[in-house]
């Protein structure tokens, strides 16, 4: 049974920013051949959009484990989970970050959840995961731990 599920889709401004590849490709290829220039510009942008969509990670708490992207973590090793927004999230991603932490961060998603681990054999002290709904993810993890 799924307690929580979310996909970290890129925001519209990410697609808009990557559209800058279109004029860049046109500047390079239009002098060579206008048809090729337009085709390359459209092809490059389509490839970027496909790559962004295909690589969008999912976060899921279900069947006794946390799945974040391709990583899996059994809930029995999950300690406390806490959500952070705004300046606190920036601190968790910046000066408060432990270099040994496992990260699933997306620049277009500001809030994060810090998931403490209770595994003495694991050198990773915690996971830090981007999420748009940190309170709900933390509640699902704390309820399942």
Image (cartoon, grey):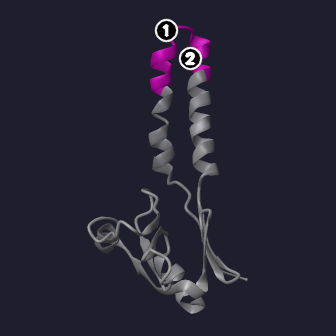
Instruction: Report helix, strand or loop for mark 2.
Output: helix
Q: Position of residue 49 (x, y in %)?
A: 59, 42
The residue that appears at 47% across and 16% down in the rendered structure is: 28
Q: Position of residue 3 (x, y in %)?
A: 65, 82
On-image quarter of the N terminus: bottom right
Q: Position of residue 110 (x, y in %)?
A: 40, 65
Name the chief secondary structure element in magenta.
helix
Examine the rendered structure and indicate whether residue 29 appears above or below residue 9: above
Residue denoted by label 2: 37
Magenta region: 23-39
Residue 41 lies left or right of residue 87; in this view the side is right
Q: Nearer the viewer, residue 105 or 76?
A: 76
Disc assigned to residue 31: 1
Q: Is residue 30 magenta?
A: yes
The residue that appears at 60% across and 44% down in the rendered structure is: 51
Instruction: Report helix, strand or loop for mark 1.
Output: loop
Mark 2 in CB contact with mark 1 (< 8 angstroms):
yes
């Amino acid at each position: 049974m799924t307690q929580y599920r979310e996909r970290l889709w890129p925001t519209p401004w990410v697609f808009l920013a990557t559209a800058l590849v279109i004029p860049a490709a046109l500047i390079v290829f239009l002098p060579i051949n206008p048809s090729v220039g337009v085709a390359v510009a459209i092809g490059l942008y389509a490839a970027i959009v496909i790559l962004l969509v295909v690589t969008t990670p999912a976060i899921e708490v279900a069947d006794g484990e946390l799945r974040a992207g391709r990583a899996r973590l059994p809930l029995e090793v999950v300690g406390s989970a806490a959500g952070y927004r705004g300046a606190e999230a920036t601190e968790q991603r910046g000066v408060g970050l432990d270099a040994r932490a496992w990260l699933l961060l997306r620049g277009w998603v500001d809030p994060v959840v810090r998931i403490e681990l209770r595994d003495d054999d694991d050198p990773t002290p915690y996971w830090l995961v981007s999420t748009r709904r940190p309170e709900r993810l933390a509640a699902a993890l704390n309820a399942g731990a």
